[in-house]
Image (tube, rainbow, N blue to C red):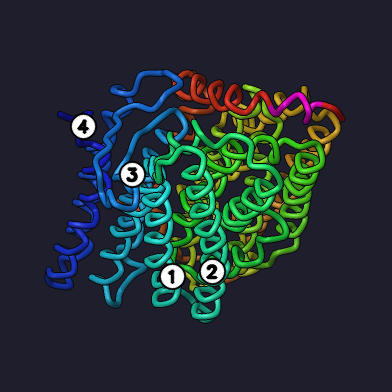
Amino acid sequence: MYAQSVLTALIAWPALAAGVVLGAPERWAKHLALAASFIEFAVSVPLWWVFQPAGGMQLQLDVPWIPNWGIHYAVGVDGISLFMILLTTFLVPLSILGSYNYITTRERAFYALMLVLTSGMIGVFVALDLFLFYVMWDVMLIPMYFIIGVWGGQNRLYAAIKFFIYTFFGSLLMLVAILTLVYLVAQRTGVYSFSYVNVMNNIGALGPVAFWLFGAFFLAFAIKVPMFPFHTWLPDAHVEAPTAGSVILAAVLLKMGTYGFLRFAVPFFPQVALHPAVQRAIVTLSLIGIVYGGLVAMVQPDFKKLIAYSSVAHLGFVVLGIWALTLQSVQGALMVMINHGISTGALFFLVGMLYERRHSRLIEAFGGLAKVVPLFAAVLTIVSLSSIGLPATNGFVGEFLVLLGAFRTYPVAAAVATTGVIVAAMYLLPALQRVIYNPLDQPENAHLADLSPRELAVLLPLVACIVWIGVYPTPFLRRMEPSAQRFIESVRPAAPAAAAR
C-alpha cells in the first residue's frame, strides 16, 4: 500500500493542507502548516529504507490522465530523485519553523503558498510524464513569485518579476521542445504519448533538430541552475526573498535545473550534449561560474548577497560533474546538490536570524559576536567551514568526488575548478572573521540575544547532517551509485566522440 500511494500522497498532501491553512484563523496558520510539513516529512522518511539501490525506477504509478492526448499521471523514484525528495521534505518544516518571527503579515497566505510550493517541487522530482513535469515546473514557479513579491524586502517587486520572467521564458522554451519531441516520436511510432519511458525508448536519431531541442531544454535548466551568464536574477531574488524563500530557492529550486540535465537534457540528446564542442562550451561555462561566482562573492558588503553568489560557484561544480561523465563525478554532482541545500540553507537561516535582531545584513554592521552570542557563532563557524569544503564536513565529500572524477576526463578543467575551493575560503573566512571574531566595536551588538530553542531546533538538524555526511557518506553513495551508473551507460554511446579532445 505504501509503495503504490506514497509519491501521490507526497504531492497531494501539502496542497490539501494549504486549503486547510487558508480556511483557518490567522493565529493558527503557522502551527497548522508546521504540522502538515512534519507529516509530509514523516511520510517521506520510509523511502530511505523502502528504496532498493538499483538503477531503475521504483514505486511507480501510471494511470491515464488525459488519454486522448496521450497524457498519463506517471510517477516514480530512483537514486537521483530520492535525495531531492528527502531534501525537500526535510527543509520545508525547518523553513516554516524558521519563519515564525519573520512573517508577521498575511500569514495564512504565506504558509499556504509554502505548502503549494512543496507539492510542485515534489511533483517535479517524481514526474515520469513530460506534461506532468511541465505542469509541476510551473506550479512551483507561481508560489515563489508571490513569496518574494509580497513578503520580500524593499525591492521585492523588481526581484519577483525578474525571477518570473527569466524562469517562465525558459519554461516556455521547454514546452515548445516537449511538444516538438512528442510529435516527432509519434511520427515514428504512431503513438502520441508524453511518457518519459516512451520518449527515451523511441527518440532515435533526430538529425539537426536535436540541436535546437537540446538548446531549448538546456536554456530552461541553465536559467534555473543558474549557470553563468543566466545567473543575474539569482542575487536579487535571494536578497529580497524572506528567509524561508531564500532557503527553499537555494536548497531545492536551483537543483531542479541540474536535475533536469540529469533526467532530460543529457539522456534525451546525448549526441548533442556530449558533442566535443558543446561539451567544452558547457564545461567552460561551469568553470566561469565557479571562479566568477567566488570572486564576485568576495566583494559583497551584504552577507546574504555573498551567499547568493556562492550558489553560482557551487552549482558550477554540479554542472562540471555531470558533463565529466564518470561515476565519481556524477555521484559528486549529486552530493554537491544535497550538500549545497543543507549548508547554504543553514547560512540563509543564520543570516535571517541576524537580520531579525539587527535589521541589517551588512557585514560591516557586525563584529565580535562570538562574545555576545557564542551559540550562534559556533553554528555559523561550522556551517561556513562546511560550505568551503573542509574535510570531515559534507561539503568536502561532494567537491572532492567531482574534482576526482573530472580529473580523469578534463584534467585542466579540474585544476581550474580546484581554485574555486580556494576562492571559497577567501570570501567566507574573512566574512566570518568580520562578523564574529573582530572587535565588538558597535554598541548595538552588545546585547543581542543568542539562539532561542526554536532557532536551535531549526539549525541543529542541519548541523547533524553536515557532520553525518562528512564523516559517513556511504549510505548516500550506495543508494545513488546504480542510478548514476545507469545515467552514464544510457548516454555512453555518444561519449566516445566527446572523448576526443
- Spatial CA span between label 2 and label 1: 7 Å
With respect to residue 172, does 271 lie above or below? above
Residue drawn at (42%, 61%) of the image: 138
The magenta span reads 494-499
Of mark 1 and mark 4, the one earlier in the sequence is 4
Q: In which quadrant will I find the N terminus?
A: top left
* Residue 145: assigned label: 1
Q: Which residue is mark 3?
A: 89
Marks 2 and 1 close (CB-CB < 8 Å): yes
Residue at image location 18% in from the left, 57% down from the top? 17
Mark 3, Cα crowd under 10 Å, few <14 / some 14-19 / many 20+, is many
Instruction: Locate residue 295: give its quadrant.
Output: bottom right
- Report the residue at 72% width, 29% height from top: 403
Numbered disc 4: secondary structure: helix
Please tell me whether residue 498 belongs to the stretch shown in magenta.
yes
Q: Do the residues bearing badges 2 and 4 touch, measured as CB atoms within 8 Å?
A: no
* Nearer-N-terminus badge (2/3): 3
Q: Which residue is mark 4?
A: 4
Query: Looking at the image, is mark 4 or mark 3 earlier in the sequence?
Result: 4
Numbered badge on residue 466: none
Per the model, the C-alpha gap separating discs 4 and 3 is 19 Å
Picture quadrant where residue 195 is located: top left
Q: Is residue 380 magenta?
A: no
Observer-side mark, 2 or 4, equals: 4
The answer to whether residue 71 is above or below residue 242 is: above
The amino acid beneath tag 1 is Tyr
